[in-house]
Each structure stands twice: as structure tokens, then as C-alpha cells.
Amino acid sequence: MKETTRGAGTARQQILDTASVLFYHNGFRAVGIDTIVEQSGVAKMTLYRYFPSKDDLIVAYLERSNLSFWEWFEQAIAPAGDDPRRQLYALFEGVAALCASPQCLGCTFQHAAADFPSLDHPGHRLALAHKRQVLERLREMAANAGASDPIALAAQLLLLMDGAFVASRMFGKDSHARQVTQAAALLLDTQLPSLH
């Protein structure tokens, strides 16, 4: 295969962009290096120069996905301003909207944990680290909103979020994941202090 002419950063970016689409749509184990090389238009030697192993490419993809997730997260809560209570409601409105999108195929971190069940695999380690970060952020938000047990509320909210992502992957854009806003509101209404 002839590699197209491009700069070093562009070749790395093209590899990562291609792998990202393939991993998200097909899973990590189902996508081989040859497929990534073929679809990216980059020579195999070039791919291995930037990513010495498939695991290195998976790590780069998950690191980028983590950054993208946090950008999305901040955008989802932004309309609520600095009000932590409203931020929690806004977050789950964002989850419902994301899960209703035809582009949403669930959570890539859940996919990584499923594809790499060994806790020692770098993909599983990154997925677990991501979920722990989300759990901690939800705990902080719950505490700031006045929850009596922010640790429990954060765990419950993460279960709702993860469940919505699973439903989105399994059932598609018309899944029951859209109900996550109402489920979160019921949970928040019972566990946060009344505004009255």
C-alpha cells in the first residue's frame, strides 16, 4: 500500500481518527491493525512508529476519549451556571440527549472493560480510572448540592448514566435511555434537600 504524503502530526492524527471510529463501532478486539492501516491510508511502518503496539493505540484512543468526555460533561452542565443542584439535573438531560443521538453507541469505557476483562490490561485500567473520575466528580457535585450521603448518590447516578449508555448501545437511538432524565430527577428529588 502506498502511503499518502502528510506531515508527522497528520499521519498520527489520521491513524488515531481511523482507529477511533473503528474501535467505537466494532469493538477493540474485532479491529485489527491491517484494517486500521487500510482505512487510514497510512503505511504499517508509520503506524508502528507512532504506536508500537495495538495496546498503545488503544491507550491513545481512550486518553483522547476521556478528554472528549470531560469536554462534553462541562458543556452539558454549563447551562446550569454555578448551581450544583441544577448542574446534576442538566447533566442527565445531557445524557438523555446524547443517548438519543444516532451517533451514540454507548460508552467506550464500558466497551474497553468488556473487551479487556483483565484488570491488568491497560485498556481496562484506563476505563476504570475514567469511571472513578466520573464517580468522584458526581460525589463532589452531590456534596455541593447538599446531599446527605454524596457517596451513595454519586454511585446511584453513575449506575443510571452507565445504564443509559448500555441501553443506547443495545436498543439504538429510540431506546429507553431517554428515560434517564426522569429517573435521575426522581433520585435527586428524594436525596437532595428541598428548595422550599
Image: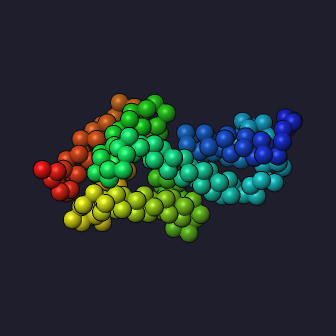
What residue is rendered at 24% in x and 41% in y?
182
Left or right: residue 190 compared with residue 93: left
Left or right: residue 132 compared with residue 51: left
Left or right: residue 55 compared with residue 156: right
Question: Which corner quadrant of the image does residue 4 belong to?
Answer: top right
Residue 57 on image: x %, y %:
68, 53
Q: Quadrant of the N terminus?
A: top right
Answer whether residue 23 is visible to the viewer in this image: yes
What residue is rendered at 24% in x and 66% in y?
149
Front residue (pair 144, 57): 144
Residue 133 on image: x %, y %:
45, 61
Front residue (pair 71, 112): 71
Q: Farthest residue to the bottom: give it.
A: 120
Answer whether residue 44 is visible to the viewer in this image: no
What residue is rendered at 72% in x and 43% in y?
13
Front residue (pair 195, 162): 195
Q: State how many labels appear.
A: 0
Q: Farthest residue to the left: give it.
A: 196
Residue 79 on image: x %, y %:
38, 40
Q: How is the image coloured?
A: rainbow
Left or right: residue 182 compared with residue 171: left
Residue 92 on image: x %, y %:
33, 44
Question: Which corner quadrant of the image does residue 91 belong to?
Answer: top left
Front residue (pair 64, 58): 64
What residue is rendered at 75% in x and 46% in y?
12
